[in-house]
């Protein structure tokens, strides 16, 4: 009986060994699938963050072009204060969004390094989709800045015109003063 038990035990051992091997292979294959899925998901989320960062960067570039135009204008120009305030708010909002993009990129790397699916989903839900709400502010600032620039150009035109008239009046006054003195010197 002992002789019969050994082949059965050996067969059972081989069977358990085969089952263990199959389970190990299945587990490692599912791990590969998960890694591939994680890599795909990370690439997708990284692309979303990069698009968000590019969008914020483009808006920062447009806002940066407005700053020198505003700085050229006189401080006492009517209507300039709301434009300046809106531009400051826009620049601040874009700075916050740029910081958020950098923060999200770091959080994404941490989430995938930890493998925590809840953290990955949290980062995914935190990535802004679509309009940031700053585009209308950018358009409003650009539009109002154009109005204020036209007002400044009109002011400059009329100041130049007034300066020409003042110079002409001064020249005429100087000419009138010279004429009587020349006439008086000829009479003597």
Image (cartoon, grey):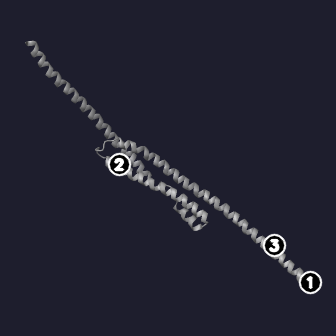
Q: Quadrant of residue 142?
A: top left
SS under mark 3: helix
Which circle's residue, 3 or 1, is located before the other in the chain? Answer: 1
| Horizontal relation, residue 160 to residue 31: left or right | left
| Horizontal relation, residue 53 to residue 80: left or right | right
Which circle's residue, 2 or 1, is located before the other in the chain? Answer: 1
- Residue identified by numbered label 3: 18
Q: Quadrant of residue 120?
A: bottom right
Q: Gap in Å between the C-alphas at discs 3 and 1? A: 23 Å
- Residue identified by numbered label 1: 3
SS under mark 1: helix
In the rendered view, would you say 85 is above or below 35? above
Q: Quadrant of the C terminus?
A: top left
Residue at 91%, 83% in the rendered image = 4
Mark 1 surroundings: few (<14), some (14-19) or many (≥20) residues within 10 A: few
| Horizontal relation, residue 63 to residue 168: left or right | right
The numbered mark at residue 84 is: 2
Q: Does any portion of residue 181 appear in the rendered image?
A: yes
């Amino acid at each position: 009986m002992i002789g019969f038990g050994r082949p059965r035990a050996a067969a059972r051992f081989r069977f358990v060994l085969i089952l263990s091997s199959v389970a190990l292979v299945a587990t490692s294959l599912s791990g590969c699938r998960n890694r591939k899925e994680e890599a795909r998901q990370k690439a997708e989320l990284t692309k979303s963050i990069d698009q968000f960062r590019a969008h914020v960067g483009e808006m920062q570039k447009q806002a940066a072009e407005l700053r020198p135009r505003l700085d050229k204008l006189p401080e006492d120009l009517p209507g300039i204060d709301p434009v300046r305030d809106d531009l400051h708010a826009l620049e601040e909002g874009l700075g916050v969004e740029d910081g958020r993009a950098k923060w999200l990129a770091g959080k994404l790397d941490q989430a995938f390094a930890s493998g925590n699916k809840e953290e990955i989903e949290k980062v995914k839900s935190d990535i802004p989709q679509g309009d940031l709400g700053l585009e209308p502010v950018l358009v409003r600032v650009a539009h109002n800045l154009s109005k204020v620039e036209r007002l400044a150009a009109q002011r400059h035109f009329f100041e130049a015109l007034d300066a020409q008239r003042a110079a002409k009046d001064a020249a005429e006054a100087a000419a009138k003063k010279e004429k009587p003195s020349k006439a008086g010197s000829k009479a003597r």
